[in-house]
Amino acid sequence: MSARLPEYPSPALRDCPYPFFEQARTEAPVYKSPHRDEYLVFGHEEIEYVLRHHELYSEELPEGTLMDCGAETMISAVPPPKHTAMRRLASRPFTPGRLRAVEPQVRRIVDELIDGFLDRGEVELMHDFALLLPAILTCELMDLPTEGPEWELILGQWAGTIDGADNMNEEYWPGLVEYFEGKVRERLEQPGDDIISELIRLQVDEDGAPNVPYLTVIATELMVGGAGTTGLMIVNAMWLLLEHPDQLELVRSDFSLIPAMLEESLRVESVILDRERIEAVDTVLGGVAFPAGARLRLVLGSGNRDERVFADADRFDVTRRHTELKQHFGFGYGIHFCLGAPLARLEGQVAFEQLFTRLDNLRF
């Protein structure tokens, strides 16, 4: 059955994979790819099961990740108990109290960015607004430059990826990790009132001595996770609203719908289309037997449009029921639920409040 299905992932499916996802969910929600050495998982129920049972499906890929530093790897790629400790440390900047304190800062950045294009009457939304908002905010919170060579380095990967320069990954990531390692060492010598310095203080209080690779990975992941993915959430949401004028009118007339609109946009246009896992033991999933060591690709973008969970799943509906919206995988699921989700939601809320308040006649 799976032999009739096209290769995934592939450039041919990049622009619009959703008809293929629907076909896969119908014909073979779990199957061994005939194109590469991995199993593909398309159904919401099956994806949720894998993400819930991290003891059966390991996050640790044998090749490591793009943001490894020494023996340390990304928070999202390590299992408990280490994952628990890393997440507890990295989540300290995102407590409700901290978010309330940072909201005026978010609003200032949003308004400054709008000021930069308001008189022009047009904006390239990703490069001139959606990407810059979370990148500037995260840099300010980390006390990093928002102009010059360091800023270009920090922004470089996401700007390149958005422009289609996927081949820059291998040479880019080691330089970014090296940059954040240097910043960690600087803050060890001269601590300040910023997130990196706070992470160092918390980690030293807990462990007794600084762990530079550990801190480097956390700082790098906070920057990368905080910038591009939030920018893509904002721009995808705007694209969906412009494609659906009735939904745009609903949200513009009632700002209380903005949070649900953002969740629905993450469901309909998944920022992260898939995640990988490694089979820890022999198991059976969706009627398919997996040997230990098998690689799985969880197609989150397919699970987010599974008709068994979401009514009229392909429809963008800003009034969709909360019971459905809370089941999307846009921020991940289980122990790997995005720790920066509260900040991303705040940035999206403020961004659309101000865009709707200050701009008229929104159109492509």
Image (cartoon, rainbow, N blue to C red):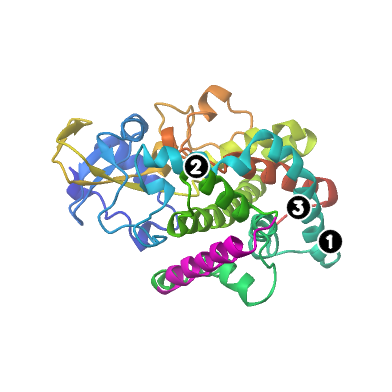
Q: CA distance from mark 2 to mark 3?
A: 50 Å
Q: Is residue 212 left or right of residue 79?
A: right
Secondary structure under badge 1?
helix
Label 3 environment density (alpha carbons within 10 Å; few <14, some 14–19, many ≥20): some
Find the distance from the CA under tag 3 to the CA under tag 1.
16 Å
Q: Is residue 60 left or right of residue 217?
A: left
Q: Which residues are magenta?
A: 171-192
Residue 168 location, x and y as percent? Answer: 44, 73
Q: Quick one: SS at disc 2?
A: helix
Give the residue pinned by disc 1: 115
Whether label 3 touches label 1, CB < 8 Å: no
Residue at image mark 3: 362
Residue appearing at x 49%, y 46% in the figure: 270
Name which of mark 3 and mark 1 comes first in the sequence.
Answer: 1
Is residue 305 at least partly visible in the picture?
A: no
Residue situated in front as seen by the camera: 229 or 267: 229
Instruction: Tell me the mark number nearer the camera, choosing from 2 and 1.
Output: 2
Secondary structure beneath label 3: loop
Numbered tag placed on residue 356 in the rendering: none
Residue 309: x and y, percent?
A: 43, 26
- What residue is disc 2 on? 206
Q: Residues within 10 Å of mark 2 (few under 14, many from 20)?
A: few
State how far apart marks 2 and 1 are (Cα): 44 Å
Q: Indicate which disc, 2 or 1, sits on the residue closer to the N terminus.
A: 1
Q: Which residue is at 59% across, 66% downward? A: 186
Residue 307 sits in quarter: top left
Give the percent coordinates (x, y) of residue 338: 51, 41
